[in-house]
Image (cartoon, grey):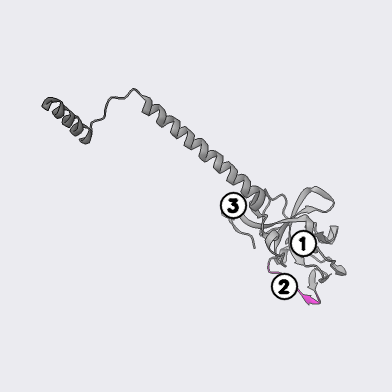
């Protein structure tokens, strides 16, 4: 009896001192399965979160063209905030992404110049909104032009949009005001190329 008790005590001591009992490999197999399961779970969660962000919050897009120079360059990659106008209003000066009025398979990116109900007029390149000249610091002198537009009053739910590179931009001067339902996002952040990265203003 004493011998058995001593053996049990020795066994207890051995385990407490850090010896590992013999294993048939089951623990290692379970460990590998656990790692694979965790990796797969994390990947699925990441995909679901990414899909949610793209569908409801932010969408990555690529700029094609130079009508928004100097703020946005051709081939810039940026995130569009798709939630901004579901919970908030569109403001003058916002850079928005919208479906081209004459072809909804195409998207354009321009700056909002006038809002529903505004009186807009362009006299040899100078923009007037509700009779007041608009100071447009985002339009460099070298990108100005001398086009004119007769005074027009924007209807409800329509917005006047223009590119910052006025001399080459195809915008509301060509295709008219843009309906609210066609505007689906606000340009938020350039992420590529790195030297262009930053908030869109």
Give the residues drawn in magenta, as a range: 130-137
Main secondary structure type of the part rendered in magenta: loop
Query: In 3D space, how far apart are the residues under numbered discs 1 and 3 (Cα atoms)?
Result: 23 Å
Query: In 3D space, how far apart are the residues under numbered discs 1 and 2 (Cα atoms)?
Result: 14 Å
Along the line of sight, the residue nearer the viewer: 52 or 155:
52
**Label 2 or label 3, whichever comes before in sequence order:** 2
Q: Is residue 125 visible?
A: yes
Along the line of sight, the residue nearer the viewer: 158 or 175:
158
Q: Position of residue 9 (x, y in %)?
A: 16, 32
Q: Residue most toward the top?
A: 24
**How many C-alpha atoms fall within 10 Å of the one at disc 1: few (<14), some, or many (≥20)?**
many
Residue 135, disc: 2
Left/right of residue 199 with respect to residue 89 in the rendered view: left
Residue under the point 23% across and 31% down: 19
- When the figure is inspected, residue 35 is found, relative to residue 180, above or below; the finding is above
Along the line of sight, the residue nearer the viewer: 45 or 61:
45
**Label 1 or label 2, whichever comes before in sequence order:** 2
Q: Quadrant of residue 189?
A: bottom right
Q: Is residue 76 visible?
A: no
Residue under the point 48% across and 34% down: 37
- Quadrant of image for the C terminus: bottom right
Q: Can you identify the residue that label 1 sits on?
A: 162
Task: For mark 2, give the secondary structure.
Answer: loop
**Label 1 or label 3, whichever comes before in sequence order:** 1
Q: Is residue 86 magenta?
A: no
């Amino acid at each position: 009896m004493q011998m058995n008790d001593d053996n049990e005590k020795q066994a207890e001591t051995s385990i407490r001192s850090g010896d590992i009992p013999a294993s048939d490999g089951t623990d290692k197999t379970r460990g590998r399965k656990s790692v694979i399961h965790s990796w797969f779970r994390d990947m699925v969660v990441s995909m679901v979160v990414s899909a949610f962000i793209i569908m409801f919050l932010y969408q990555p897009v690529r700029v094609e063209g130079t009508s928004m120079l100097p703020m946005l360059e051709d081939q810039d990659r940026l995130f569009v905030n798709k939630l901004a106008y579901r919970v908030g209003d569109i403001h003058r000066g916002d850079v928005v992404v919208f479906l081209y009025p004459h072809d909804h398979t195409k998207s354009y990116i321009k700056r909002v110049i006038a809002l529903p109900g505004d009186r807009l007029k362009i006299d040899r390149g100078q923009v007037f909104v509700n009779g007041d000249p608009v100071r447009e610091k985002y339009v460099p002198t070298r990108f100005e032009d001398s086009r004119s537009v007769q005074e027009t009053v924007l209807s409800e739910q329509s917005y006047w949009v223009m590119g910052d590179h006025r001399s080459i931009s195809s915008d509301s001067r060509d295709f008219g005001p843009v309906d609210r339902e066609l505007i689906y996002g606000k340009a938020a952040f350039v992420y590529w190329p790195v030297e262009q990265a930053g908030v869109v203003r």
